[in-house]
Image (cartoon, coloured by chain):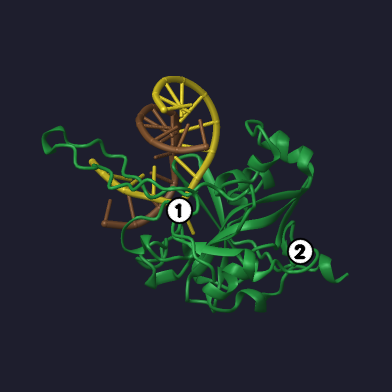
Chain colours: A green, B brown, C yellow
Amino acid sequence: MGTTDPLPRDFYDRPVLEVAPDLIGRVVRHTSPEGPVAVRLTEVEAYAGERDPGSHAFRGRTPRNAVMFGPAGHVYVYFTYGMHWCMNLVCGPPGQASAVLVRAGEVVEGEDLARVRRATARSARELARGPARLTVALGVGRQYDGADATDAASSLVVLPGDGPRPGPDRLRRGPRVGVAGEGAAAPWRFWLDGEPTVSAYRPAVSRRRPDPSSGRLDPTGRPAGPDQRGATSP
DNA sequence: CTTCCGATCTTCT
DNA sequence: GAAGATCGGAAGC
């Protein structure tokens, strides 16, 4: 029964930069009345709590991020851009507020249901390629904010995953997607090299139109670059 | 394939 | 009042 038990609290109760790469290859599984959908993780990002300018917890506890300050192994779900839900797994001891954003994966169970939920996906690899797409594929929303992913009785759990752990030769790390400011350069995004489900790299964008009176000097400050820009081996 | 841009609304300043 | 841990469609190569 080993592989059906969720990863235990101890797994998450470590420094977030240890937990994040260890989550690659693990399986997030949600069982709804419609059936189960499971995703094998290929891409995650670490957010290091109050010391991380890129983290929702950087300016301390608020109603939204309260779950991040709680026990490890619980799920932090937030709403963003007026329409998307994203899910994290809380790490470290209570009070530390670190978490891992679940960014992308491969649907390994319930693909038919995932395709119904992700009707705009034109291929299997797009079903959970991106943090908001992944929550749609799984059927996860606000109702799971604060849920305990280590509870075997929960309908949302993280399982160890089948087979051997991915080799370190395939693990990559680089800057996080869409993170602006001081935290932009930290190489705290982890992914599995060669996986088609890894989401495209996007630097943070400013939505402000350029000021017409200030010329045309790269108003967004946005460098161009390929998906795995800044990648290094561990 | 890539780049550009609008949608949409909660959250915190 | 502005920004945001994004996505999908349209247009360009």
Pick the quarter of the image with the C terminus of chain A: bottom right
The kind of secondary structure element at disc 2 is loop
Residue A218 placement, left or right of C10: left
Image quadrant assignment for residue C12: top left
Q: Position of residue B2 (x, y in %)?
A: 45, 38
Looking at the image, which residue is at 74% across and 61% down?
A154
Answer left or right for A182 relative to A212.
right
Position of residue A157 measured from the top left corner of the image (x, y, whole percent): 72, 61
Q: How far apart are labels 1 and 2 at the CA level? A: 25 Å
Q: Give above or below for A123 relative to A72.
A: above
The residue lying toward the viewer, choosing from A71 and C13, is C13
The residue identified by callout 1 is A177
Q: Chain of mark 1?
A: A
Amino acid on which disc 2 is placed: Gly
Q: The N terminus of chain A is located in which quarter?
A: bottom right
Q: Which of the marked residues, 1 or 2, is nearer the chain's N terminus?
A: 2
Q: Residue at image x 54%, y 76%?
A: A92
Instruction: Please tell me which residue is depicted at 24% across the width and 42% down the height of the picture.
Output: A218
User: What count of labels does the image hold?
Assistant: 2
Q: Is residue A122 visible?
A: yes
Please give the label number shown on residue A136: none
Residue A210 in the figure: left or right of residue A169: left
Element carrying mark 1: loop
| Three-letter code, disc 1 | Val
Labels 1 & 2 near each other (Cβ < 8 A):
no
Callouts 1 and 2 in the same chain = yes
Position of residue A160 measured from the top left corner of the image (x, y, whole percent):
75, 67
- The residue at which mark 2 appears reads as A161
